[in-house]
Image: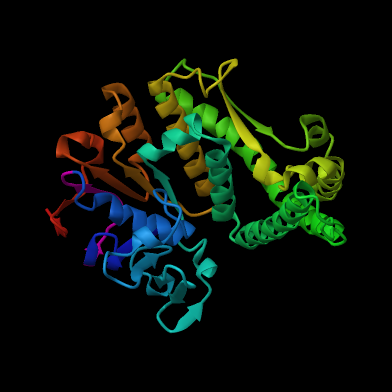
Amino acid sequence: MHVAHLSLADFRSYARAEVPLDPGVTAFVGPNGQGKTNLVEAVGYLATLGSHRVSSDAPLVRIGAERAVVRAQVVQGPEGDTERRRLLELEINPGRANRARINRSSQVRPRDLLGIVRSVLFAPEDLALVKGDPGERRRFLDELITARAPRLAGVRSDFERVLKQRNTLLKTAAMARRHGGKGADLSTLDVWDQHLATAGAELLAHRLDLVAALQPLADKAYEQLAPGGGPVGLDYRSSIGDDALAGAAGREELYGRLLEALTAARRQEIERGVTLVGPHRDDLVLRLGPMPAKGYASHGESWSYALALRLASYELLCADGGEPVLVLDDVFAELDARRRERLAELVAPGEQVLVTAAVDDDVPGLLRGARFSVENGTVVRQ
């Protein structure tokens, strides 16, 4: 799979942009702040319905515009096979529902686009996977889960909706307690517990399967990038407790363990006014050798670890069928010469690799493919 053409309207810094793309390596080169990352961000947005740089849609719309449009022609299968081409369009409307189309005529839900374009993106922000809060690692797992099984977008949405409703109920009860008023009606809490456990067990089961699949691939990728520097290990830490997690085999058992944990935590949750048990409280612990990578890994080791996670994701998606677009956003300038060459060797065979760099010398010789110059709001093929 590759993107054959990218069109932008009022997206980020671009009033209009038309970028024809080929399979293989394409590099966008130009000074910082000229819009290189905006181009690959648009591809990533079509793949995940989210940005790797911001948490809301508003910054994606050009200043002064009401909405932005990202459009891409995607080729699935051999080049020239018109039956395998799709035109995807996503209209971004901050504060309102986004709109999506496939092949212009059929209006669909935005999440119906998931799985058509698949991408793996590595950017400087990915250091947060190693050094940042648990939320960064949960997001990494959930986005990869959805890339592999787009229907899980609905499960994630259900879980977030139930969690919000349950937290509202708990917060109301906590406020009533603190102010000495009549206790809130908690008669529906059991129902919300069941809904939370249902969606939570599904999400948790997929996360556990994913971590098991990623473990050997991440270790292999780290060894390729930094020979002798590992091994790396991935340990899932659940809010229901490691013992409960280890004893659960399948969604039904996970459902039961989540319900038990919610019951045990209920008094504390009512006091604090927040849900303390569930996938939203879990973490992925990254080990480097015998030690946790967070707090112990050097800057270079952290970079290599983050890269290894993305390369493992790429290999996993390839194994599922169909190569994703691999995006390397301003990566090579941060790497030493050895890691730069090793990374280039690993990604060069990809069906489509998009690279951004401030100067041409930052792009390794192995990745000398198509070149675009990006400057002053223009994208020109060299």
Helix, strand or loop: magenta stretch: strand
Of the pair 290 and 165, the residue shown nearer to us: 165
Q: Residue furthest front?
A: 180
Of the pair 348 and 258, the residue shown nearer to us: 258
Can residue 249 be seen here? no
Q: Which residues are magenta?
A: 16-31
Residue 207 in percent (x, y) is at: 66, 44
Of the pair 162 and 185, the residue shown nearer to us: 185
Residue 161: name its quadrant: bottom right
Q: Is residue 356 left or right of residue 283?
A: left
Vertical arrangement, residue 193 with respect to residue 6, above or below: above
Residue 289: name its quadrant: top right
Residue depicted at x 44% and y 26% = 302
Residue depicted at x 42% and y 49% = 52
Of the pair 112 and 61, the residue shown nearer to us: 61
Residue 128 in percent (x, y) is at: 46, 35
Q: Is residue 359 left or right of residue 187?
A: left
Q: Is residue 380 left or right of residue 4?
A: left
Vertical arrangement, residue 324 with respect to residue 337, above or below: below
Residue 5 in percent (x, y) is at: 29, 65
Residue 240: name its quadrant: top right
Looking at the rendering, in which quadrant would you find the N terminus? bottom left
Magenta span has 28? Answer: yes
Magenta span has 318? Answer: no
Q: Residue furthest bottom?
A: 105
